[in-house]
């Protein structure tokens, strides 16, 4: 029946002989469908596609001639997978001029990508190219901010006070029993490293990146509008909405159990939908709970391993406890993130199938949203813990908070948690890019190819000869099937989160993202051209729900960076000290101002250090970083007025920063028009020409009618044209003009 239906549409059908697959018990048959030129023209009229009106040849290099021919001669392109370099084909042009690492510095041939793979894939690579291009100025500014931190580290007064040789401040132990008293100057390296990312330039960079995100979104809207015009997609949205409305109206006429694309085993009644949605909510919360539980397990690992390393007899180990714990914990978080990413992807698909969406678009959007929520929480939960929760609710010496009555909560280093946040962010971002995005995408296909090669060596001579006789489309059948664009978009959206959300703590993030994307574009191109089956071309006017996710991440980034600057870094405490408490308006004395006193006699029983003489003398008072009253005051260890002043300044900064940056982003959005001026003028001209063309066509029709009815011509000339012009709807004129 399918063959008959295709034949009735004037398509030419050619049935190929069956070919054997890798498994000798299975066979695959191929049916080749050819569309004659007049059928293509007829369908183009129905779809209202714009067609070229002349052929253009430009004699330049070989590939340039091929490029001009492919762009301007319809129906002459051989779109099969051809590996012969002398053949002028669209595939060969993409393979040589796009899917090659040697052309990484060139612009992508987006027009050819769209012509071979369709608008949906063309829009993805256009978006990825613009995103990579916009990362160039962000990378340059980030490098400048980092170099500014390197250049000013020797002039930073707080780090100079910490590293001063005469600094004799004794600090309280970092853990119970196993940890000893220590000197503040031991944190010299951490304090100097923290200044590289915690300096006034990072505030400017945060504002810059918020405006950069707004400009990127606006430039993409302009680029998308230009592609819509060039690819004749300006009327595609209305057609799609009408189709969805029609499908919704028709679905109301049928019983819920009769929904299309559902087998008998998968049919659900209307009453079954509510339990499916409840199951999805419960499972989503359960998966998020799994992520929180794993992060909590890593916290317990950090606490335990810190106490164990402090008990080591090796002095080198004891002096590098913090670095070892930070690095190993970050690596553990990375491994867990990579594993859970695969698990959450499968869980999100299973939950979406339970909902039984009515359309493919609805299924895709729900799948994307669930996958994004799970993977976003998975990737950023460890980072959010370090940025906003670690060291906040730990208590004080003599009254620390404990988990399970034995695990004392972690404290930040004296330079703050910003350095640890930078380590966690860099390891997670670089690890995901190198391992998940590049190594998996390169290594897994190579491994599968090696396995197929090993299997081919074991085949008999007859099987090898049969393989050599296979046609190109037969060998392409054994390539990996196309799994959709969701994984490609998802890794870029998560990367966009790394670049914007915590950029105040890691200004080099745009640079690493740029280097990754330069490779990612050619890697994806090579995968689409040579390693995947050619996907069915699909039309799309925009990138869909991904744009909304990008806007959401950009808005959240402003809030998160405001809290990172205000609460994670020491930017606000430095300002408060300099303008409220400093005797001379400088930063001298800031370190001493941020530390409180503790009388070691107030330690709880069993919590004091095992070796109180570790420093060579008896310690009576130790210091810890907090704003609290000293033990000799009337209210010992109560938060001081300085604490409330700093807290008020932090909250005020969050409010001001958020509103100012969002206002500036809205101004950028308002200043940059969504439609390029030349495209707007061209669309306006086309509308004028369309109206003029329609009027000429109507005048010709009326003249023809008048010539056929000479007896009543005068009466018709007086009344008929007006009546006909009013009775013709606007959509009819639009169709005539587009068909022309």
Image: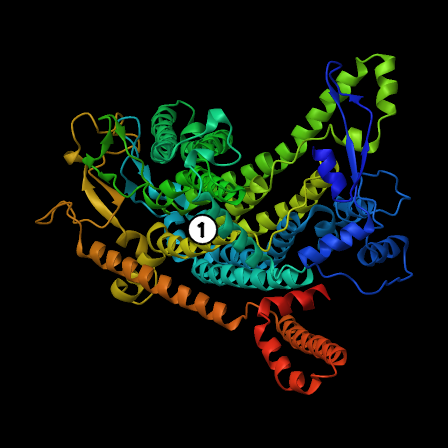
Horizontal side of residue 351 vs 491, given as left or right: left
Q: Residue at x 18, y 35 (%)?
A: 398
Is residue 588 at all visible to an observer of this figure?
A: no
- Residue 158, percent from left and from top: 37, 54
In this view of the protein, can residue 7 be seen by the observer?
yes
Q: Position of residue 64 (x, y in %)?
A: 86, 56
Question: Which residue is more in the foreground, 179 or 475?
Answer: 475
Q: Which residue is mark 1?
A: 501
Q: Is 211 situated above or below 175?
A: below
Question: From this viewpoint, which residue is outermost toward the left?
Answer: 634
Locate the C terminus by quadrant. bottom right
Given residues 506 and 439, the one toward you in this image is 439
> What percent of the width, then of the height, locates residue 489?
56, 45
Residue positioned most to the front = 711
Q: Quadrant of the N terminus?
A: top right
Instruction: Mark 1: give few (<14), some (14-19) or many (20+) Cα within 10 Å.
Output: many
Q: Nearer the viewer, residue 139 or 532?
A: 532
**Quick check: 218 left or right of 627?**
right
Q: Secondary structure at mark 1?
A: loop
Pinpoint residue 217: horizontal percent, then vertical percent.
Answer: 53, 60
Please say if 219 is above or below 38: below
Q: Give the colour scheme of this rendering.
A: rainbow
For residue 506, above or below residue 363: below
Q: Quadrant of residue 100?
A: top right
């Amino acid at each position: 029946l399918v063959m008959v239906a295709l034949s009735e549409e004037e398509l030419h059908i050619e049935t190929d002989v069956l070919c054997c697959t890798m498994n000798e018990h299975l066979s695959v048959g191929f049916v080749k469908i050819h569309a004659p030129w007049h059928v293509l023209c007829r369908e183009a009229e129905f779809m209202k596609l714009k067609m070229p009106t002349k052929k253009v040849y430009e004699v330049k290099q070989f590939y340039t001639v091929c490029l001009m021919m492919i762009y301007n001669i319809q129906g002459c392109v051989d779109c099969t997978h051809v590996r012969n370099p002398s053949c002028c084909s669209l595939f060969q042009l993409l393979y040589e001029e796009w899917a090659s690492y040697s052309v990484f510095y060139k612009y992508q041939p987006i027009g050819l990508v769209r012509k071979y793979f369709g608008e949906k894939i063309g829009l993805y690579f256009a978006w990825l190219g613009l995103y990579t291009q916009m990362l160039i100025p962000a990378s340059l500014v980030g490098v400048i901010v980092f170099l500014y931190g390197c250049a000013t580290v020797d002039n930073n007064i707080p780090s100079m006070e910490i590293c001063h040789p005469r600094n004799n401040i004794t600090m309280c132990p970092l853990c119970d029993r196993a940890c000893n008293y220590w000197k503040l100057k031991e944190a010299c390296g951490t304090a100097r490293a923290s200044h590289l990312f915690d300096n006034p330039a990072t505030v400017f960079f945060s504002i810059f990146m918020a405006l950069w995100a707004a400009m990127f979104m606006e430039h993409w809207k302009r680029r998308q509008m230009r592609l819509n015009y060039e690819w004749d997609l300006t009327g595609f949205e209305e057609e799609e909405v009408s189709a969805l409305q029609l499908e919704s109206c028709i679905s109301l006429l049928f019983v819920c159990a009769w929904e299309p694309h559902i087998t008998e085993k998968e049919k659900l009644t209307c009453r079954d939908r509510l339990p499916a949605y409840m199951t999805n909510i419960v499972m989503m919360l359960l998966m998020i709970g799994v992520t929180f539980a794993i992060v909590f397990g890593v916290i317990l690992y950090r606490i335990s391993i810190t106490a164990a390393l402090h008990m080591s007899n090796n002095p080198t180990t004891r002096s590098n406890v913090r670095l070892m714990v930070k690095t190993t914990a970050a690596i553990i978080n990375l491994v867990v993130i990579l594993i859970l990413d695969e698990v959450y992807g499968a869980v999100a698909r299973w939950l979406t199938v339970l909902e039984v969406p009515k359309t493919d678009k609805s299924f895709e959007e729900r799948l994307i949203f669930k996958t994004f929520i799970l993977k976003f929480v998975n990737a950023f939960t460890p980072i959010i813990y370090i940025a906003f929760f670690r060291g906040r609710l730990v208590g004080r010496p003599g009254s620390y908070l404990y988990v399970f009555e034995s695990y004392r909560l972690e404290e930040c280093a004296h330079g703050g948690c910003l350095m640890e946040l930078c380590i966690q962010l860099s390891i997670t971002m670089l690890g995901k890019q190198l391992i998940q995005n590049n190594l998996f995408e390169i290594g897994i296909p190579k491994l599968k190819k090696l396995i197929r090669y090993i299997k081919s060596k074991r085949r008999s001579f007859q099987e090898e000869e049969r393989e050599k006789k296979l046609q190109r489309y037969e060998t392409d059948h054994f390539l990996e099937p196309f799994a959709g664009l969701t994984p490609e978009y998802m890794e870029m959206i998560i990367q966009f989160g790394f670049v914007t959300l915590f950029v105040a703590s890691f200004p080099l993030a745009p640079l690493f993202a740029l280097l990754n994307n330069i490779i990612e574009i050619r890697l994806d191109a090579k995968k689409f051209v040579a390693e995947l089956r050619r996907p069915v071309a699909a039309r799309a006017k925009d990138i869909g729900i991904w744009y909304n996710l990008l806007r959401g991440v950009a808005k959240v980034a402003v809030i998160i960076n405001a809290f990172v600057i205000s609460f994670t870094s020491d930017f606000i405490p430095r300002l408060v000290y300099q303008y409220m408490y400093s005797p001379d308006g400088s930063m001298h004395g800031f370190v001493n101002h941020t530390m409180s006193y503790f009388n070691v006699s107030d330690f709880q029983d069993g919590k004091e250090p095992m070796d109180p003489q570790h420093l060579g003398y008896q310690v009576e008072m130790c210091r810890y970083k907090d704003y609290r009253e000293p033990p000799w005051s009337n209210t010992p260890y109560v938060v001081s007025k300085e604490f409330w002043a700093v807290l008020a300044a932090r909250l005020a900064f969050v409010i001001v920063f958020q509103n100012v940056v969002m206002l500036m982003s809205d101004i950028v959005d308002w200043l940059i028009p969504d439609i390029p001026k030349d495209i707007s003028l061209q669309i306006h001209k086309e509308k004028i020409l369309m109206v003029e063309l329609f009027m000429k066509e109507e005048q010709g029709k009326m003249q023809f009618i008048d010539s056929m009815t000479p007896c009543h011509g005068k009466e018709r000339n007086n009344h008929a044209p007006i009546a006909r012009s009013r009775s013709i709807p606007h959509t009819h004129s639009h169709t005539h003009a587009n068909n022309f």
